[in-house]
Amino acid sequence: MRDGFVALWRGREFDASPEGDEVRLYAQEPQDGFEEVRPGRYVRAVPAGDLEAFAYVRTTCQWRGQPFVVLAQHDSWLRVEYTGGRAPVAKALGLEEFDFGVYQGWAPVAEVTDLHEHKV
């Protein structure tokens, strides 16, 4: 599940992170001009103007009839954050209050519906 920036550079999409006038591109395998920062993680900074596209990707879903953003996946579970804005509903779902007004929990993948990736 993706939740973060992506960039299209030289016809290929990379996970990305903006930094001023540059964007750091990340790859999981060696690429020309990329530096290995740890095993299986490569990075290269490019001028933002060299990108073909730049967007934020967010994965959303429904769980138990309520709207969520998917933050992560582990085995057959999704880490989800409630986006319905109603604290009583979040509490009734058994979600943890991660921060003031921010409710998260783990949902079984088999119970999740309407799983969609959105680029903004």
Image (spheres, rainbow, N blue to C red):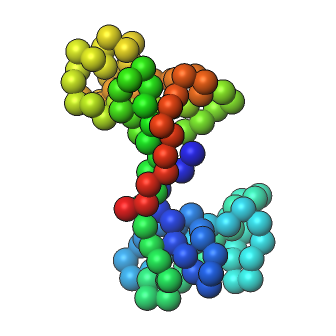
Which sits in the foreground, 6 or 84?
84
Q: Is residue 93 above or below residue 103?
A: above
Q: Is residue 118 among the parts visible in the rendering?
A: yes
The residue drawn where x is 55% and y is 31% is 78
Q: Is residue 83 above or below residue 13?
A: above
Q: Is residue 90 above or below residue 35?
A: above
Percent of width and height locating residue 52: 50, 83
The residue drawn where x is 69% and y is 30% is 75
Image quadrant where residue 111 sits: top right
Image quadrant where residue 26 sits: bottom right
Percent of width and height locating residue 53: 47, 77
User: In the visual, does 6 lie left or right of 104?
Assistant: right
User: In the visual, does 22 lie left or right of 31?
Assistant: left
Image quadrant where residue 21 sits: bottom left
User: How many dots with numbers?
Assistant: 0
The residue drawn where x is 57% and y is 45% is 1
User: In the visual, does 120 lie left or right of 72?
Assistant: left
The residue drawn where x is 31% and y is 19% is 90
Q: Is residue 94 above or below residue 3?
A: above
Percent of width and height locating residue 104: 40, 27
